[in-house]
Amino acid sequence: MAGYDYDLVVIGAGPGGYVGAIRAAQLGLKAAVVEKDKPGGVCLNIGCIPSKALIHQAEVFGHGAELEKLGVKLDYKGFEYKKVQKKSRTAADKLSKGVQFLLKKNDIEYISGDARVNGKHEVTVDGKQTLSCRNIMVATGSQPRELPGFEFDEERVLSSTGILMMTELPKRLVILGAGAIGMEFAHVMNAFGVEVTVVEMLDSVLPIEDAEAVEVIAKAFKSRGITMLTGAKASALERGDKELKLTIEHGGKSEPIACDKLLVAVGRAPNGAGLGLEELGVAVEKGFIEVGDYYRTAVESIYAVGDVIATPLLAHWAMKEAEIAVEHMAGHEGEPRLPDELGPSAVYTVPEIGSFGPTEQRAKELGLKFEKAVFPYRGAGKSVAVEQPEGLVKLLYHAETHEIIAGHVVGANATELVHELLLAKKGELLPEDIATMVHAHPTLSEAVMEAARTAEGWPIHA
Amino acid sequence: MAEKVLMTALSPTMDEGSIVSWSKKEGDSVAAGDVLCEVETDKASMDYESTQEGTLLKIIRGEGQTAKVGEVIGIIGEQGEDITELVQAAESDAAASEADGAEADGAKAEASRGGAETEAAAEPTGAGAGDGAGNAEGAAPEARGGAEGSAEPGSAPPPPAADGERIKASPLARKLAEQRGIDLRRVAGSGPGGRIVKDDIENYTPAAGAEASRAAPAAAGTGVYGATLPAQDESIPVSRRRAVIAKRLAESKFSAPHFYLTLSVDMEQVMTARAGLNRELPEKAGLNAFFIKFAAEAIKRHPVVNSTWKGDSVLQHGSVDIGLAVDAGAGLITPVLRNCGAKGIAEIDAELKQLIEKAQNDALQPEDYTGATFTISNLGAFGIEEFTAIINPPGSAILAIGKTQKTAVVDEDDDLVVRPMMKMTLSCDHRVIDGAAGAKFLNDLKQMMEQPYRVLF
């Protein structure tokens, strides 16, 4: 180890940090993780995990309406949203402890404190403790982006963190930003009976997803009474005593909207600045740390992964990047980066979206020689049986070789179903391989098989 | 951990091979890429390059022995490792295989040295010579366009016992290889477990695969009859090349309805042109280069002759790829000159010389002899006056060239004159080429040869 305390010091114990540290331990490196908050990072504590807990509770709550259709009389009187919120905290705490356990199990030192990179091989914690190490991996993540004029007070103007901590339901909620975060909270809040308005600057909700898939969600949201204003912009906010008064520019007009709470979900800001990296010659651009192959910075001993670099801000990207970076430190020469088209994205609304690869629109812009196959969920008997027939499986494939280019699944369990297509892409399977594989009946996965058959020109249930 | 060394398919149509010689002895260390042994396939003798590393612990198939693709020919492992079990398993396999191939194997000891001579003796030898039968080789007729044989391991199914010898390739890689006519056996896999993936196909260059070809084995074909001729019947084992020739020509003759057209050509102008050109060329061009050039020019004017029957369509080839039947000693082979329509005689002749040399050294690669869209077979050098040839798929026609000889001809003035005449016979696949179309082509070819300025038309 040439006199270093550690082979690797990881800054940040989120999905990038803790996965990287464990992978390092597996490869025989001595690793430490420094975290200023809780193990698990945003994802486990104030992101993916608690929000999925809320979404699950929303689903459970929604079953009430289905029971009523069977004649069951329900009494909602004892319902308290704070119990819902508490469940989400329980889930987060459990998993955060789980991360701590995993670190311990792998003999990784967990150090609580604020880390700063002090040299190419040196990290200081809270300005006191100095750790020397062969490699440093920065995985400091991101935080909710603030919008000037709409600064978070976390009482009424909330970030995603604020709304996760909220223990009482507002009557009216406006959400700025219709990305995955905005749309997921719109779904949850609507399910619990909140009057929700989503305001999106771009022309469509979920603008990075495939338009055909988004249309299914937009239609479902509309029928559930969620107001979606696209091509719209909030221009002013007045924090009145009783309510919030927003001014929305929409369709060339200015329109006032009153609400009780406002969620600002217009993106996330990376935490790359102020760590001491710039002083060592590492470029940090608007908070993003610049990296090259294997996620290594201009300083050979320092790597950076996750939300703090300019790749999709998603937990599973961070995990994969950390694996690649750490394996490189251990002398492995694998793929130098996760190719964009092999990173899936998931939106946990009802219905869900699971996707990878370019949207149809994007594929056209890229000039790809592709064709598409679309199969509706309702063609798979199971979707009708479980009363979730809304959705589709969309496959983009190369016109000549039939190589899978992209998969877009919208509907129940889409975030799980998409992986069959992604595995096929990664393993270089062709649609015909999926088309000819037996899928159990009845399953939603049959829709994936039928989409592949559509690509081959012989869907059975269409 | 000791590993079996398996016979691999070194050419697209190979399903067994015989060991000509081992380059490594038992106990020698082996690095990946080292030549382990020389293997005679159905096409040529090729070097077997090791993909394994370690020490050659045991040779299971000795020189002169034959192994099917997928059978164990040796064992590589670490010095001093116990390999009794592997050896026993391999040897019992070998015994079983010998039992069912007793005849072939028994003859093999002889064939490894004598086999080539046996055939060579029976057939005329010499460059540019064909054996009437057009050509057999092509072996994988679709190798350029379809490469089905190579993409689908099913074409030469290895025995199930041969674990790991199935070519590991992703379905996408298989498809790309098929579309591009790349033989998967020549591609190194970079995916998990050595699987061939898309990138391997995209980055594949034929040169990399061709390096495997070797310099020059002993020149075959110095055939002399043995001092004592057999007094009784003798069963002579069929070489792999002979087996392929047999199979392919039978297929062609039985599936393509042949018809034949014959014309006499006055060769005086061709000979004058050749003499004139050769005064200027650094290397004298052979007559076959002229035949190829004239045929290519005539084909350009009659593209139907340059087609392939596809069952529900006729594929008219964009490139005129002319094969020339060559007797390579151990059997007929047809090296192919690509895109002859775009080449001059000097270029054609230079390429032809290279190919013939390779053919005689058994060094042709599959891409050198597959996919001829038209074929020429010239037996004039053997004194043959005229003959009919069997079409060489995927082409639909073959031109059989006879000897040029002084012939008494009645000229336009009804005088008897002596002219250098040559008879050529075109065999056509009637599914593709009708009588009139074949006749027009042949007549144009004759006129060009008699009045070479017509090439300018």
Image (tube, rainbow, N blue to C red):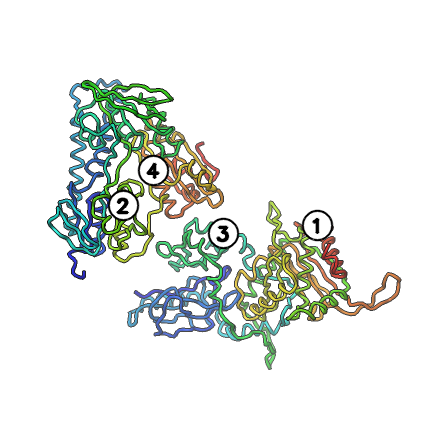
Mark drawn on residue A441: none
Q: Could you tell me the amino acid type at mark 3?
A: Glu
Is disc 1 on the same chain as disc 2?
no
Label 4: few (<14), some or many (≥20) within 10 Å?
A: many
Label 2: few (<14), some or many (≥20) within 10 Å?
A: some
Q: Nearer the viewer, mark 4 or mark 1?
A: 4
Residue pointed to by mark 4: A417
- Where does residue A296 sit, x and y in percent of width and height? 28, 51
Residue pointed to by mark 3: B178
Q: Could you tell me the amino acid type at mark 1?
A: Asp
- Quarter in which the C terminus of chain B is drawn: bottom right
- Quarter in which the N terminus of chain B is drawn: bottom left
Horizontal arrangement in the rendering, residue B151 relative to residue A354 (left or right):
right
Q: Is residue B209 visible to the viewer in this orientation of the structure? A: yes
Q: Nearer the viewer, residue B69 or A183?
A: A183
Q: Nearer the viewer, mark 2 or mark 1?
A: 2
- Where does residue B100 sit, x and y in percent of width and height? 46, 65
Mark drawn on residue A284: 2
Residue pointed to by mark 1: B434
Q: Earlier in the sequence, mark 1 or mark 3?
A: 3
Q: Could you tell me the amino acid type at mark 2?
A: Val
Is disc 1 on the same chain as disc 4?
no
Q: Earlier in the sequence, mark 4 or mark 2?
A: 2
Say which element carries label 3.
Answer: helix
Q: Quadrant of residue A171?
A: top left
Q: Is residue A320 visible to the viewer in this orientation of the structure? A: no
Q: Nearer the viewer, mark 4 or mark 2?
A: 2
What is the CA distance from the residue labelled 1 to the residue labelled 3?
Answer: 32 Å
